[in-house]
Amino acid sequence: MTVATDLVGSQTYRIRDQSGANSPLQLDTQKFQARLLQVMVKYSAAVTLSVDVTFKSGAGSAWDCLLQRLTFSANSSGVFIPDEEIEMGSDDFIRVDAPAGGGVVTSAVAIYVVAVG
């Protein structure tokens, strides 16, 4: 598991990682001013579980906020695209918690953000 950050547009970044077999995956964006575009989660087989997408505030845990719970019910992929703009300050970040899928199932997470400011 190695976090990679790819520049995929003039100001658009993809932060990505993948788990080993039957291992949880927690992926955070870097702390920089950005706007969340989308989160993509893919398991190597159908699973039944929930993946949380959370805004982690630089102001402290009292301001953290669950943005979306992706519920997988015998399927292998999910996408979260915010309905409203979600801006991150220089000390905020997005966290995706993808639980282990069981057996030999692996997971992959990609978070897309656009730099602002």
Image (tube, helix red, strand yellow):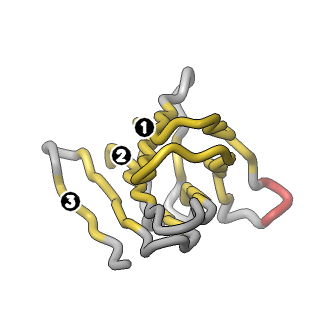
Comparing 81 with 47, the one in front is 47
- Residue found at the very far top of the displayed protein: 83
Residue 112, disc: 2
Residue at 17% in and 55% down: 7
Comparing 45 with 81, the one in front is 45
Q: Residues within 10 Å of mark 1 (few under 14, many from 20)?
A: some
Query: Considering the numbered disc 3 on the image, is that residue within a helix, a strand or a loop?
Result: strand
Tell which circle, 1 or 3, labels the residue nearer the N-terminal end: 3
Residue 6, disc: 3
The kind of residue on which mark 1 rests is Gln
* C-alpha separation, residue under disc 1 versus residue under disc 3: 15 Å
The kind of residue on which mark 3 rests is Asp
Query: Considering the numbered disc 2 on the image, is that residue within a helix, a strand or a loop?
Result: strand
58 relative to 29 in the view: left or right = right
Comparing 20 with 68, the one in front is 20
- Residue found at the very far right of the displayed protein: 62
Residue 40 to residue 91: above or below = above
